[in-house]
Image (cartoon, coloured by chain):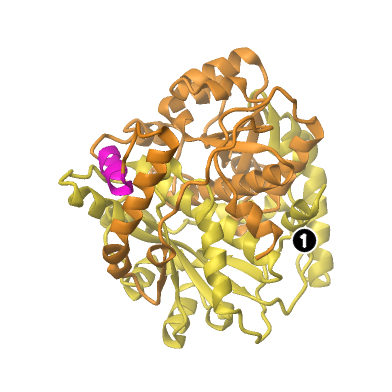
Chain colours: A yellow, B orange
Amino acid sequence: MNDVINLLNQHRSIRKFTEQSVPNEWIGEIVKAGQAAATSSFIQACTVIQVSQGDTRDQLAQCSGNQIYVAQAPVFLVFCADMHRHKDACELHQQPMLSGYTEQFLTASLDCGLFAQNCAVAAESLGLGVVYIGGLRNQIARVSELLELPELVYPVFGMCLGFPDQNPEVKPRLPLEIVLKQEKYSVDADVKLMPEYDAQVQEYYRTRTGGGKEMTWTEQISGMLVKESRPHMLPFLNEKGFLLK
Amino acid sequence: MNDVINLLNQHRSIRKFTEQSVPNEWIGEIVKAGQAAATSSFIQACTVIQVSQGDTRDQLAQCSGNQIYVAQAPVFLVFCADMHRHKDACELHQQPMLSGYTEQFLTASLDCGLFAQNCAVAAESLGLGVVYIGGLRNQIARVSELLELPELVYPVFGMCLGFPDQNPEVKPRLPLEIVLKQEKYSVDADVKLMPEYDAQVQEYYRTRTGGGKEMTWTEQISGMLVKESRPHMLPFLNEKGFLLK
């Protein structure tokens, strides 16, 4: 359709970077582009922490299940959902903040999502590659301590940025008819088109791994969802002042 | 820096649209660009419902606190966090899905955030204007019924799209130094720069409203957070199978 849409459609996660450093002023421009995203009721609840010190980076890599690129990428950013400055704003005006609502957790987290995606797009427009690091939530309490996050702040995910030193294929997405429904929810398209998509994903993995992995999408999903999913998250978030009601 | 970053930086919500219709194939391209965003562990947990029927649009506008553009915009999309197809995938492979985890709620919601932001960028690259409609969550149970959403699906937000019939100013964002921190969390920049930003926001509202509204950012935030924040969200989400543990 146009260059912007082509750029969006070419996204794939980059986990291997050249040693070329990223100009420091680019980081500012990328984060400013993140700020330009919509923000729920103007709350601006995303704070980015750039981590450059090698020792902290090593520890964050460990926290993420030893994803080595967390330590090695030229730039590493942690996106935090931040309602701490809102508490300060309330105190400034002698207004007691009512916190702990699920809605506030959701809007702060979504603010980070929109913000970070703008950063990803801005970075890719500059020729950089990125990968989101949800794995930080494996050991979210330790990450939170390392970054000295106060109450009402939590690390949503990280992002590695740098010049790509690999060129992986774009991963095939669900058929549009499954994802875009008309007027109401219906599973008609899912029933009809999922087998075809499963075959497509299987072929993608077969080609990419030289036959080592041949998993369909539904197999991959079902294999993942029989396990517990970071059960420490709710107690951790509660302790930080989120999701209390 | 470049055309893409300029486009991102020019974002402002558009709430008034011309009558020009949006070509139907554009919607498919916009949603495909949304799908191209990163997705946590390949879960692809975002489903978009396009609502065109006037009666449903009127009711959704009511649900959103009578935001008339929800009824009038040429295109209205509802972004849903969807773990229903994952349950189907598990059943297909006779694997009992462990659902209800906070982590799953978060990843599905973030998937929608990244997805929708790509849609917003794609739409704006085509000359369209957009506004997110978080107000759908005012009456989320009724929205959910109208769209016949099954368990493990909830409406995160809506989005109006169309050709802009207004040209509002870009709203000033927090100073970069507050939002981008180095190595660790610190409130030094907040303390130092917030008064200046407050003055800037006050001036923005003064100019925009011809003196009718002169609120600073911290005033706006503190005024908002002394109130309850959609307290129905947690019971509703629990009923849909989310945030149970």
At horizontal 56% and vertical 30% (from top left) the residue drawn is B15
Tell me which corner region of the image, top left, top right, bottom left or bottom right, holds residue B213.
top left
Above or below A234: residue A58: below
At horizontal 31% and vertical 33% (from top left) the residue drawn is B231
Q: Is residue A182 left or right of residue B41?
A: right
Query: x%, y% of residue A217?
Result: 71, 52
Query: x%, y% of residue A113?
Result: 52, 53
Of all residues, the one furthest to the top in this rendering is B55
Question: In front here: B175 or B80?
Answer: B175
Res A99 seen here: yes
Query: x%, y% of residue B122?
Result: 70, 46
Read off the residue under disc 1: A170
Tell me where the magenta segment starts and ends, as one range.
B216-225
Asked whether B222 falls inside the magenta stretch, the response is yes
Circle 1: element type: loop
Q: Is residue A8 left or right of residue B188?
A: right
At horizontal 40% and vertical 36% (from top left) the residue drawn is B238
Asked whether B80 falls inside the magenta stretch, the response is no
Give the residue type at disc 1. Answer: Val
Query: x%, y% of residue A24?
Result: 54, 78
Q: Is residue A151 left or right of residue B63?
A: left
Above or below B65: residue A171: below
